Image (cartoon, grey):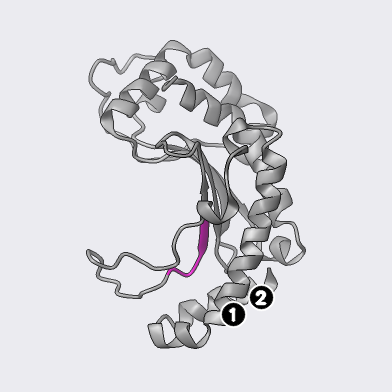
Amino acid sequence: MKNTLEFLTELSEHNSKLWFDEHRKQYENCKKAFVTELENVIEQMANIDPIFETLEAKKTIFRINRDIRFSKDKSPYKNNFGAWFTAPGTEKAGYYLHLQPGNKTFVGGGIYMPPSDMLKKIRQEIDYNKEELDQILDAPAFKKLFPVVKGDQLTRPPKGYEESNPAIELLKHKSLVVSVNISDQEIIDGKLSQKTIEAFTVMKPFIQFLNRAFD
C-alpha cells in the first residue's frame, strides 16, 4: 500500500493522459493491491452486515477517471481510490472507503443527498425513533470514532416539522454521514483493512437505522 500512496501522489503531480498511459502498469498493480484490501474487508464484514454478503470487491470501486464535463478543473484523473459498499441495485445508506495520500484517507458511511422521497422516509424514521437513534449516536465506541453526524443542513425546519421538535437538528440534514481518518503511516503499517473493518463495525447500527426507513 506504500507503493499505492506513492503512485497517487505522483498522479496528483502529473495528472495527464500521457503520464497515466506511461504508468498504466503501475496503476494496475496499485489497483490490484487496493482490491485485495477490499476483499479482506468484504470477507470480514459479511459476518457482521448482510449488505456485504454478495458484493464483489472490484465492483465496489469508483472509476479513476474524473467527470470533467461541468468542472473548471480539467484534470482527467482522481488522485484517490474510492469504494462504496451498499446493497446491490439500491440507493440506500452504505459504507465508504476513501484512500488518498497526505493523511486524507478516511472511512465513512451514511447516505449522501438522497432523493426527496427517500429523505422524507429517513426523517420520519428519525422523528418516530429519536431515542433509539440517540442511543446509537451516544454509544461510547460510536462517539469516540464519530463525534458528529455530518452533512449539509437546511437553515429552517423541513416541511411538516417544528423548530421545537427534539430531533430538529438531525431532521434538518439533507445528508447524514459519519467519517474517521486513517493516517498514511497506519496504511504503510498494513492497518488499512483492519481500521476499515473496525470503523464499519461501529457504524453498522447507524447504517441499519437509516436503511430501516426503506423497509
Q: Which residues are magenta?
A: 78-82
- Cα separation, mark 2 vs mark 1, equals 9 Å
Q: Residue at x 62, y 74 (%)?
A: 29
Q: Is residue 126 left or right of residue 194?
A: left
Name above or below for residue 1 compared with residue 116: below
Q: What amino acid type should be assigned to the residue bearing mark 1?
A: Gln
Task: Decide which of tag 2 and tag 1 comes sooner along the chain.
Answer: 2
For residue 11, say whether it is visible: yes
- State yes or no: discs 2 and 1 in contact (Cβ < 8 Å): yes
Give percent across and percent down for residue 183: 66, 60
Name above or below for residue 119 compared with residue 65: above
Q: In the rendering, which numbered label is found on residue 3? A: 2
Give percent across and percent down for residue 91: 40, 37
Q: Residue under label 1, please give it.
A: 26
Q: What amino acid type should be assigned to the residue bearing mark 2?
A: Asn
Task: Name the image quarter holding the N terminus.
Answer: bottom right
Task: Classify mark 2: residues with Cα within 10 Å, few (<14), some (14-19) or many (20+).
Answer: some
For numbered disc 1, what is the local secondary structure?
A: helix
